[in-house]
Amino acid sequence: MHQIRGIVLAVMLSLPVVTAPASGAGGEPDYANHPLYAKYQFGGKGAKVVDLGTQPQGVPIGIVGATLGHDRLLRSALKGQGWEFRTHSFLKGVDSNFFFQRGDLDVALTGDWPTFTLAAVWDIQVLGLAKQGFSSVIAKGPRQMTDLKGKRIASPPGSSAHYGLLVGLDSVGLKESDVTIVPMEANELSEALAQGKVDAFAAWEPVPNNALRTHPEFSVVQRFMNNSYVYLSADFARQNPEIAELVTAAYVRALRWMREDRTNLLRAIDWALQDAGQMLGKPSTLASEDMVRTTTDDLLKIAASPVVPRQDLAANGSIHRAFTFLQAQGKIAATVPWAKIEQSFDTTLTDKVLAEPERSKILAFDYDE
Amino acid sequence: MTNNRPSAGWSFRKGLLLSYGLATLLIFALSQALVVFGVPHTSFTGLWASLSQEAVRDTSVMADVRKGQLEAWAFERRGDSMAIGENPLLQAAVQDIVQQSPSALEAEVALKRLREYLHKIQESYYGEYAKIEIIAANSGKVLVSTRQAEEGQDASRTSYFSKALNPSVEEVVAKELAAGKVSDLVFARAIHGPGGEGATALHGVLVLHTPMDRITKSLLHEGIGRSGEIVLVDQDGWLMAPLRYPLADGSVAKPLEFVVTTKPAKLAAQGVETVIEALDYRGVEVLAATRHLRLSSELAWGLIVKIDKAEVSHPIRQTMVAHALVLAGTLLAGGLVILLIATRLARPLAALSRAAAAIAAGDFTVRTVPDGSRELQELSHTFNSMADRLEHWHQDLATEVEKRTVELSAAHQALLASEARYRQIVETTDEGISVVDAEYLTIFVNPRLAAMLGYQPEEMIGRPASYFLVDEEQALHREQEALRRQGQSSRFERRFRRRDGSQLWAMVSATPILDEQGRFAGGLAMISDISEQKRMADDLRENQARLDLALRSAGMGVFSTETDTNLRTFDDQACRLFGLDPQTFSGSAEEFFRVVHPDDRQAIRSALARTIADGAAYEAEYRVLWPDGAVRHLSARGRLVREGAGQTERVNGIVWDVTELRLAEEERQRLQQQLNQAQKMESIGTLAGGIAHDFNNILAAILGYADLAKDDAPPDSHFARDIEHILTAGLRAKDLVKQILAFSRQGSADRILIKIQPLIKEALKMLRASIPSTIEIKEDIHPQCETIVADPTQIHQIMMNLCTNAFHAMEQSGGVLQVRLAMAHIADGDDSAARQLAAGDYVELTVADTGTGIGPDIIDRIFDPYFTTKEFGKGTGMGLSITHGIVKSYGGAITVESTLGQGTAFHVYLPVAVVGQEPEETEETAAMPSGRERILYIDDEDFLAELGASMLERLGYRVTVRQSSFEALELFMNDPEQFDLVITDQTMPGMTGFDLARRMMQIRPDLPVILCTGFSNLIDEESAKAVGIKGFALKPLTKKDLALLIRQVLDGSAARP
């Protein structure tokens, strides 16, 4: 009886967690009155402001976003043309997608699912790869994916981790409806599993590593190689080609700067942690050491430039595979043709910046102290 | 003699053995299941789960270790390529050779040094690299190599060379097919150096070749169990290292020639790291851990660590086999012991069994020999005694049977002769005959009776007589049986039950049979079939009953009217319908017509006369008056019939109550009228909302320009007074629009602190003009009435509604309209008409007339929406409903007193705000403020834009006007600080004022904005203020309205931190 009471209590306690944030009509979060985003000051259409959407809790994209925000060369070059650069923090990619489609954002860094679903409905220009790393499904004790049938699995909805979870379920013949997806923000996942509010969770690094270290009883059920991308609004790039090139150069420069010296990377991580703290209203629980390792493994150690490999767009390439999968799962409308996604991956700007390193100033660095 | 010996079933010995075996097997199976699968809902998970989890963990750990090894190895190689490729000495040497065009000798020396450097690197890595080479960027030829013979060869077509030349690629990791079997893995990197004019140039490509077999040999197949194996594939599934086992068809797969299509290989190649159970390339079931390695953004490997499921489950099988062996041994030993015991117990029992069988077969001489345990020997002795007695009884019985048989034979012959005589009589008669004995069991039936009941005669013999009767006749049968036992005969009808279950009605003549001593010995019955007669009578009764039921169900009454006497016959239901007492109703025409409504009597007479005259169907609908005063609607239908020898004429028919039908019809018509009225009101509302915006814009121009002209007119001149009239009329029109909108429920109420005395007087002034002189208006307005919170327009509306109703009530006759306004105090427990109010002070408005009054039957409905007594087109039916709604929304009450023919008085109670509180200073008494701030004014209407600018400039402001929201936004974005205030119209093409304000405030959040609207369904003050718009105004605005609002917004803004 005590056990049953405990379970009921745990389910009741979990309700506030899984229902946040407030929802608008039709179950979609009420972004206009979102406690975090409602106060953001976007430049707006026509204003000479570059608005960047980043995710301080996503590693390494949050660190890249923070680095761009502290790039004096970028700010100076923009100011020379009467422009300003602003960064805006989001909890997850699907949130930044909303503001991107509203015209509030010009540049964004998000995981693969948010990137693909946005590209399906909006004209974007993907500049390059911002991450190649694993998202993981974590549960208590050694388990296989088949053991999760009928269980409650927490995940930020519409995220890379959610995508990885669906792939994992599909690999053992399970559908999304065979489990109960519990929508939850990344910073709440580990404790929810520890307290038994859910049976497993899916998240991107460094949340899983952090959780495994804090809770030895946790184990990895499955991991999936996700990508993240940096992209511009196609309209913005078309109307402001010089500004778009400056942003692209700043992105490439940020990678080179972080690769150059571990001290630089730690400085960038501090910025990202500050952003996360400001966004959450409390210190982030992410550990710097995890962030260093994840950024190094998932971005800086990738033996190539940030350019998206063309083979990923080939018939069995990872992007084409993801598109087919998400469409089959009903996450991308059946009417969206593959060409719509493919044409979003236009790396002309990145190639140009890399081909002219001196002019693009990707070899010189000047960041805030 | 019947042989009852069991022909099947288990022997004692077999049962014992089977019970023992099954119990042992059950216990074993249960213990095995617990060991293997654990106890549900406990922490004891069982061997299967713990071994499975252990196997999952082991394969995962092994896969992680091997993946780590591969990653570390690849990272080291990339580190090598970077360290070598970015070595300034090497870069300088390559640049010298490629760019400086040294002499042949110098070039040879430089190449030799470079070659030696590469050799040293190769040696220091203990064979890690099969070959190190540098390819000239400009020619694509091998410049220098640790394999000197390959120098000068063309390498420009290799994939890694062309990729390394791409400026957007820093380093390349690629696989290369080596001549032969196993591939090389290639790490390539561009070698840069100084170019012309301070720029960097690409001079060559450093290529490190590392053989795949060096990697795979060290990590594959070892230390992962008896059947374990590691499979390495690239991202397309191509096998990268040799397999441990041949394929399913026996052939051996070669690296880079075979694509592994198993599920684990696909998952690993596509980036999924997991542990799954699947079939491997041999078709064998395995537990596989998949891992994914990204060597570069373009090159990835899939690593599969797998172990056969058979090996995983081997310990479980071993445990189960051991348990099975122990069980088999236990079963065998136990079985032998049980067999010995069972055999010893069963032998004497078998001998007894055989003896008993012989006796049963008629051999009474058989005896048994005592054997076995004491109890079995006693059983044997007892059995032998029983056999002795049986043998003796058998001999006595045979003698007695022989004697009795002779006696019975003689009696039987005599009986046969007697019976033959009677049989002939009985079998030829047409009536059924039955004879029962003293127990009333049938002892004889003749063939006729058997045929009537569907039996063979012999089937009826021995059955009780009651057996052949239906259940309902049983009680009567018992009564008749009693009469027979008393010696009485009788004749009666009786229902028999045939063999097939059907009934047979019969006439029975029954006579008792007495024995020689006169005692009842049985009975004789003569039976005739009368089923046909009975069926006809039943049909007749049933038809009558159906008809009665139908009439009762439909609530219909039956009537019959004799045409010559005009006498009526009603059944009970008909009497109820007419409100007549069936016991006292005489049927006379006078008594009948007394209950019929006077207006309908002639219609009945006419209908009756028509039916009698031409034989047409009688149809009439009329009202009757019940004794309690209720009026009921009845409908009657009938026809003319002639019956009897004298051809008596009657109109026979039915009558039923249609009151509910008629009331529903009236209600439907009333609702339809209400619906028509509501639709009309909705149309007026839509129309009002539609014209309000444009009308307000027009009024804005009239009022605005009148305001400006007033400023220019000489004070106290005719011109100034004329303009004042225009302003008064314009403000009245403004109120009118507002009233129309409020009436159509599209406007909002503005409640303020007011004294309503002036409003009442103002309304009366307006009414005087429209009310005829036959109606005298008396007013009694107490000036000391306190302040209330109300919308002046709504108070005006209340007055107009109540007074208009009063006017309509006196329109024909004239009269007095009395309007009174006074204070009223409602105390706790006050039982006056306004007792639903909370105790406190109220302003009481009374509107009384001396008109027609309101009847008690409708006075409860006068506040219902759309309820009206006025003729169509004269009233909406909404006036009192709206008034009631307004008063209730103020926390007040409205009551009504009315007497038919004398008049009506409405009392409206409105709560006093706070006794002694005065209304705020009105606009009329406030000063008109001005200022010097810079204002951006936006309105798409030409004359309104011009008017706004004029008004603002006269108030001292510096004004910039735009007639397009886009132009205004562009102007603002050029310098967001150039304006202190933005005043914008809401309804504009392209971008509304609301959106314009929001976009401006995104750029400059502290910008004060005033949003003006003629009328909008889309925006109200609350939603405007929610997004930070500081001022909201409804058009038309006078200059003073505008002046006050601007200061309120600007000074409020300035006051904010």
Image (cartoon, coloured by chain):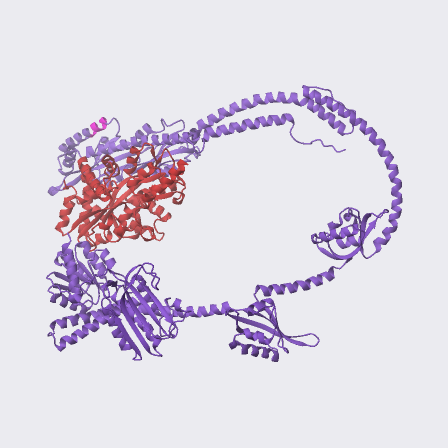
Above or below, B905 against A317 in this view is: below
Q: Is residue B120 magenta?
A: yes
Name the quadrant of the N terminus of chain B: top right
- Left or right relative to A249: residue B487: right
Location of residue B286 in the rendering, given as x and y in whole percent from the top left corner: 41, 33
Location of residue B304 in the rendering, given as x and y in whole percent from the top left corner: 36, 34
Tell me, what hue is chain B? purple
Stretch of the chain drawn in magenta: B118-124
Corner quadrant of residue B306: top left
Residue nearest the observer in this picture, B717 or B892:
B892
Residue nearest the observer in this picture, B356 or B808:
B808
Total labels drawn:
0
Location of residue B148 in the rendering, given as x and y in whole percent from the top left corner: 22, 31
Residue nearest the observer in this picture, B213 or B739:
B739
Corner quadrant of residue B774: bottom left
Residue nearest the observer in this picture, A221 or B600:
B600
| Dominant SS in magenta | helix
Above or below, B894 against B330 in this view is: below
- Left or right relative to B637: residue B695: left
- Left or right relative to A166: residue A239: left
Q: Is residue B507 visible?
A: no
Q: Is residue A270 visible?
A: yes
Instruction: Spot the red chain and give its letter.
Output: A
Q: Is residue B303 magenta?
A: no
Location of residue B970 in the rendering, given as x and y in whole percent from the top left corner: 17, 59
